Amino acid sequence: MLELFEDVDINRSEAVWIAQGLRALANCDGLAAGELAMVENLERELDIESTANDDFDADASPLRGEPQQAVFVRTLVLLSLVDGHVSGRETDFIVDACQRMGLSEERRAELEIDAKKYLLGSLEGVRQYREQAVAVGKRLGLSEAEIDEVLAT
């Protein structure tokens, strides 16, 4: 997931706040092992201390602009997909976070698609199991065109 951060300047306070937000999302409907592992791995990759005992204040965003907000939203969406089911609470959390940052519903939807395309991108170039890769894209809610774009057909 660190690839999502590569082209965006994320400072330490932003990285900590993003990790706190991810933990809050993971806890909103019961913490799954995969979600916890993803947050802990990201903390290690970003070289920040564990945020396990931190509170998340959605109104205290240190994010400096839209690129940083986009990284945050994409990571939230990816975390919500870890257990294979996006709960209503997770969706509400993401929608609320976007509203608090002033992102439009349209922009939130674009970032959600970006995150899903990123996830499907791990199957880019698959030939032998293409049918299964397409099925994954459809389960993610991507259109045929989006799936073709990601799988490079």
Image: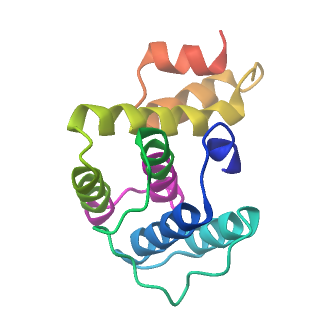
Vertical comparison of 149 with 93: above or below: above
Q: Is residue 150 left or right of residue 31?
A: right
Q: Main SS type for the magenta part?
A: helix
Quarter of the image with the C terminus is top right
* Residue 53 locus on image (x, y percent): 52, 90
The front one of 137 and 4 is: 4
Horizontal and vertical percent position of residue 40 = 66, 73
Residue positioned 40% across, 68% down in the render: 25
The residue positioned 45% from the left and 42% from the top of the image is 70
In reply to whether residue 81 is colored magenta, the answer given is yes
Percent position (x, y) of residue 120?
60, 34
Which quadrant of the figure has residue 96?
A: bottom left
**142 is higher (above) or lower (below) than 42:** above
Residue at position x 22%, y 51% in the image: 99
The magenta span reads 73-90
Q: Quadrant of residue 97?
A: bottom left
State the image coordinates of residue 106 (x, y, percent, origin top left).
25, 31
The residue at 65%/31% (across/down) is 121
Does residue 26 belong to the magenta stretch?
no
Taking 135 as reference, is 81 above or below it? Answer: below
